[in-house]
Image (cartoon, rainbow, N blue to C red):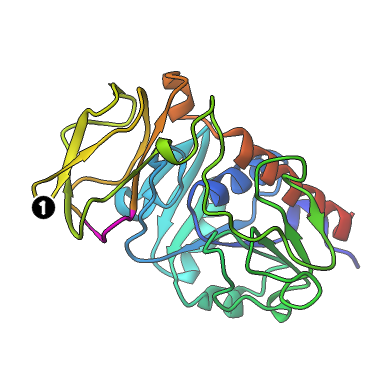
Amino acid sequence: MTKPLHELIIGIKGAGEMATGTACRLFQSNFKCIFMMETRNPLAVRRQVSFCEAIHDDKMIVEGVTAQKVFHTEDIQSAWANHAIPVIVDPEWACIKAIRPDVVIDAIIAKKNLGTNLFEAPLVISLGPGFEAGKDVHIAIETNRGHNLGRLILKGCPEPNTGVPGNIEGYTKERVVRAPCTGIFKSSLTIGTLVKKNDVIGTVDEKPVTTKIKGIIRGQIRNNISVTDKLKIGDIDPRGNIEYCTTISEKARAIGGSVLEAILREFN
């Protein structure tokens, strides 16, 4: 007998921005048996829309959907009973073997395959470059902004990583704030702060971290975190709308819709 859609168990690798947008889209579509696997010290930039923050703060709410940190595989059912998405420290994805989900989604956005394979679930989906549909996963989803964003790929690969951030009001690389060196990032500013071009928004081992454009700090890593040279540590949005800091982006929302389409295609 075919399992009802709302009883499908969905495991998501990663709990960053794109993974969170996907999880929210599925949860709001009545898929309530979702669990997310993260590293011990996740480094999200868009922290206010990333469920991996639950690893640090025990709970995270994004657009009305709650993620809850759990410590053991056995606690996942309790989180579901509380209408929450469990997030567990599980960088080796041991939960997949223990729970045997119906769907596995690689939403790490590592730009390469860290070990995901076709045999992890009846349906294995990947987001972004580094995967070949039909070989590594059943369905790959295009994450590059443009005409093909969100396209389901049943055979072949998504577009390779361009290394260029998405264009917002004419700005691409200028939007990204990177660490000037290896060290400890410190900042007294918070996400949502308006900044001007060349403002100092923090330091890494006393070297200033400066902005290249005027806008709003849409994302920034946690304070007092160890970073490596050139690591992305912030995101400046030239549109200056503070609501964008706490809401899922159009890209993450589109990708989440594509994952929903892939699941319905397979199980409906």
Q: Residue at x 83, y 56 (%)?
A: 4
Residue 127 in picture, x, y percent from top left:
65, 58
Residue 178 in picture, x, y percent from top left:
31, 48
Q: Is residue 178 magenta?
A: no
Q: Where is residue 46, by image quadrant?
A: top left
Q: Where is residue 24, by image quadrant?
A: top right
Quarter of the C terminus within the rendering = bottom right
Quarter of the N terminus within the rendering = bottom right
Q: Relative to residue 136, is residue 243 depicted above or below? A: above
Q: Which residue is mark 1?
A: 205
- The stretch of residues the image draws in magenta is 226-231
Q: Residue at x 73, y 71 (%)?
A: 132
Q: Residue at x 44, y 71 (%)?
A: 90
> Is 77 placed left or right of 211 in the picture?
right
Q: Is residue 230 magenta?
A: yes
Q: Relative to residue 68, is residue 169 depicted above or below? A: above
Residue 118 in picture, x, y percent from top left:
73, 78
Mark 1 surroundings: few (<14), some (14-19) or many (≥20) residues within 10 A: some
Camera-side residue of 60 and 255: 255
Q: Residue at x 65, y 42 (%)?
A: 145
Q: Secondary structure at mark 1?
A: loop
Residue 59 in picture, x, y percent from top left:
38, 46
> Is 67 placed left or right of 230 in the picture?
right
Q: Main secondary structure of the magenta part?
A: loop
